[in-house]
Amino acid sequence: MMRTVLSLLFVLTSAQVSFAAGSGGSSSYSSSSSGSDTSGTSSYSNSGSGNQQKDPFAKAYQFINNENFDDAFKELQTVTAPGKKADLYNLLGFTARKSGKLDVASEYYERALTINAKHVGALQYQGELFITLGDIENAKQNLEKIKSACWLFSCKEEKLLQVAIEEAVGS
């Protein structure tokens, strides 16, 4: 019985870690009002050869790190990232939002979430867009979706959106 429980816990933990790795969290940027944007520019492997390839978003990350969001947006529009479309759309949404193109940002977050409804990075950023638009209720709904996606372990996206909501409502 104990072995079964431990095996189940291991499987659930492994699934949670795998899900988080594929959710876009590693390439997520914080856009809270504190201005603490961080990057996680990591390379991904080409499953065919096992060789590491350059991160397709690396040049855009450089622009983002320099807070040059317009150029980052333009760069991202040229990126082809097979298997990473949700991440690409999330970053396009992020850079559009940071450039003040809120309608464009909204469209890209929707695209990312159509591909992966549990993409915690897109849920966080869309939640921050909702806050910008004064729609705290939808931001809170996104927070609940993140909590559901990260039910076993807390995600940094959950904490960042929670803080942004608290700052927005003044609590």
Image: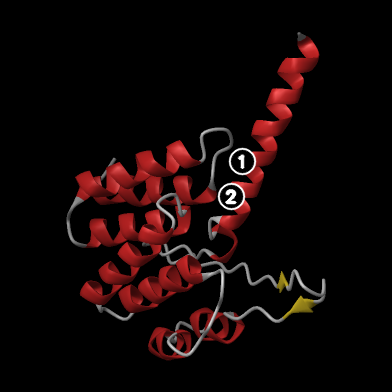
Task: Name the residue at 77% across, 11% down.
Answer: 2
Residue sitting at x 55%, y 80%: 61
Q: Amino acid at mark 2?
A: Ala
Q: Percent x, y for residue 12? A: 64, 32
**Quadrant in which the C terminus appears:** top left
Considering every residue shown, the one lying at the far top of the view is 1
For label 2, the SS is helix
Q: Position of residue 121 (x, y in %)?
A: 46, 58
Residue at the spot of label 1: 16
Residue nearest the observer in this picture, 71 or 76: 76
Q: Is residue 37 above or below residue 62?
A: above
**Residue 97 visible in the shown view:** yes
On the question of residue 32 being in view, the answer is: no
Q: Is residue 5 above or below residue 55?
A: above
Q: Amino acid at mark 1?
A: Gln
* Residue at the spot of label 2: 20
Category of crowding for the residue at label 1, using alpha-carbon neighbours closer than 10 angstroms: few (below 14), some (14–19), many (at least 20): some
Could you say which quadrant of the image residue 14 lies in?
top right
Query: Which of the 4 quarters of the picture holds residue 35?
Result: bottom left
Mark 1 to mark 2 CA distance (whole Å): 6 Å
Tell me the SS state at disc 1. Answer: helix
Q: Residue at x 48, y 51 (%)?
A: 157
**Dot 2, crowdedness within 10 Å: few (<14), some or many (≥20)?**
many
20 w.r.t. 46: above or below: above
User: Which colour assignment does the render follow?
Assistant: secondary structure
Task: Give the residue at x 33% y 71%.
Answer: 108
Q: Position of residue 99 (x, y in %)?
A: 32, 81
In the visual, does 132 lie left or right of 60?
A: left
Check whether the beta carbons of the residues at disc 1 and disc 2 lie within 8 A of each other.
Answer: yes
Residue 114, image x, y percentages: 36, 59
Residue situated in front as seen by the camera: 170 or 140: 140
Relative placement, left or right, of 55 versus 164 is right
